[in-house]
């Protein structure tokens, strides 16, 4: 059985639905700080959980006798920069609790890292798997610390910890909250609802991105990979494309010729974006466990606009 924290977040909502499809609904215990009307609170076990409460987390993991913990609950980069102390307490306190529960119950463990784990002194083009990591954001400090902590639990206790350095994730089901790469999700919503978008990230600011279906596949493929093949664990570079706002807009215009893009730069999130790589190298993931992204910018854009169009139709008909 699999315990998922942060189950109502951008990754969590889709990952829980996918895991329930693959392993069976009753095998996946979804948890989050509060409940919602989302179907995952009804399509299988759902529990309220504040990940900073170690006893509550242990009690749920023990009640369901889970053998896998997927820890997603965290504050993203922009929010973490606004509230650094809260970010440290939640991102690191929650991670430590999840690692301790996994150690006590002997669970396999996954938590995401991010391209945010790299900083201004990291080589920015085709960033290597193993390279300097001196991020200057609280989120980046959390992610590097998290990678080191997860590797520590593997070397010290033999805990089977695995992680992925995710790029910006694009999805149409649950929007991200408080991220720097959120513009790349908002632009599609804005295209469908308004035919135009004002980007807070500047033209020519290239960042790695990936479509959510590829991210979900990567989590499952990594967790099912033969442990003896892994020479890295926390965490693998994975990416599908490196884009800036203009590249996304140009792809949208192939479907919606009248779409317009303009800019109103947010200095905080622009500053965070500029401290991150332009593109990262995913060779280690490809060779050690066969990582392969299916969606490039063209395929992702086509699917996003179709799915959001359908969502728009449902919304107009008053279907949530
Ligand atoms: C963020 N979406 O923007 C997250 C992610 C690489 C970006 O870490 O903070």
Image (cartoon, rainbow, N blue to C red):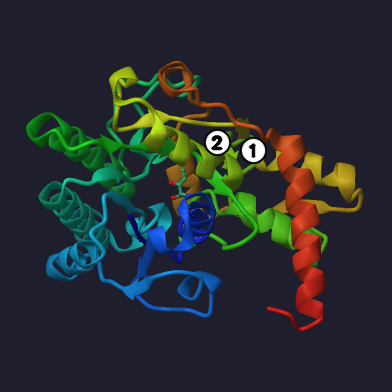
Q: In this view, does 147 lie above or below 137?
A: above
Viewer-closest of 119 and 174 = 174
In the displayed image of the protein, which residue is found farthest to the bottom?
A: 318
Query: x, y (%) of residue 221?
Result: 46, 34
Query: x, y (%) of residue 279?
Result: 52, 26
Closer to the N terminus: mark 1 or mark 2?
2
Viewer-closest of 317 and 64 = 64
Query: x, y (%) of residue 91?
Result: 26, 55
Q: Residue at 69% across / 54% down in the picture?
A: 187
Q: Name the residue under label 2.
A: 207
Q: Residue at 20% across / 33% down in the picture?
A: 151
Question: Badge 1: few (under 14), some or many (20 or more) residues near its Cα, within 10 Å?
Answer: some
Viewer-closest of 306 and 141 = 306
Q: Can the viewer see residue 281 in this picture?
A: no
Q: Can the viewer see residue 14 in this picture?
A: yes
Marks 1 and 2 in Cβ contact (< 8 Å): yes
Q: In which quarter of the image is residue 224?
A: top left
Q: In which quarter of the image is the N terminus?
A: bottom left
In three-dimensional space, the C-alpha distance between marks 1 and 2, rounded to whole angstroms, equals: 7 Å
**Disc count in the image?**
2
Q: Mark 1 points at which residue?
A: 244
Q: Viewed as shown, does residue 39 lie left or right of 135?
A: right
Q: What element carries label 1?
A: loop
Q: Does mark 2 have its CB less than 8 Å from ligand 1?
A: yes
Q: What element carries label 2?
A: strand
Question: Badge 2: few (under 14), some or many (20 or more) residues near its Cα, within 10 Å?
Answer: many
Q: In this view, does 216 lie above or below 197?
A: above
Query: x, y (%) of residue 172?
Result: 65, 58
Q: Is residue 13 above or below residue 210?
A: below
Q: Is residue 142 above or below residue 97?
A: above
């Amino acid at each position: 059985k699999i315990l998922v924290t942060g189950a109502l977040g951008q990754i969590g909502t889709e990952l829980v639905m996918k895991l329930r499809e693959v392993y069976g609904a009753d095998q996946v215990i979804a948890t989050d700080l509060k409940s919602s009307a989302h179907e995952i609170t009804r399509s299988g076990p759902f529990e309220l959980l504040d990940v900073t409460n170690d006893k509550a987390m242990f009690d749920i993991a023990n009640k369901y006798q889970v053998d896998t913990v997927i820890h997603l609950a965290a504050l993203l980069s922009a929010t973490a920069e606004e509230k650094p102390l809260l970010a440290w307490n939640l991102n690191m306190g929650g991670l430590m609790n999840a690692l301790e529960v996994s150690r006590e119950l002997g669970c396999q463990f996954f938590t995401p890292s991010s391209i945010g784990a790299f900083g201004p002194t990291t080589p920015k083009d085709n960033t290597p798997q193993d390279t300097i990591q001196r991020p200057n954001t609280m989120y980046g400090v959390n992610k590097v610390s998290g990678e080191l902590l997860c590797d520590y639990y593997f070397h010290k206790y033999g805990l089977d910890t695995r992680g992925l350095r995710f790029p910006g994730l694009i999805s149409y089901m649950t929007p991200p909250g408080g991220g720097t790469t959120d513009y790349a999700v908002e632009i599609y919503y804005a295209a469908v609802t308004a035919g135009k978008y004002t980007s807070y990230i500047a033209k020519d600011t290239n960042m790695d991105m990936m479509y959510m279906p590829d991210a979900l596949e990567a989590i499952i493929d990594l967790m099912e990979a033969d442990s003896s093949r892994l020479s890295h664990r926390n965490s693998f570079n994975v990416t599908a494309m490196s884009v800036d706002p203009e590249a996304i807009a140009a792809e949208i215009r192939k479907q919606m010729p009248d779409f317009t893009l303009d800019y109103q730069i947010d200095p905080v999130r622009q500053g965070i974006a500029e401290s991150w790589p332009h593109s990262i190298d995913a060779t280690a993931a490809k060779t050690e466990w066969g990582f392969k992204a299916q969606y490039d910018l063209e395929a992702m854009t086509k699917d996003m606009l179709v799915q959001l169009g359908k969502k728009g139709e449902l919304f107009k008909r008053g279907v949530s």
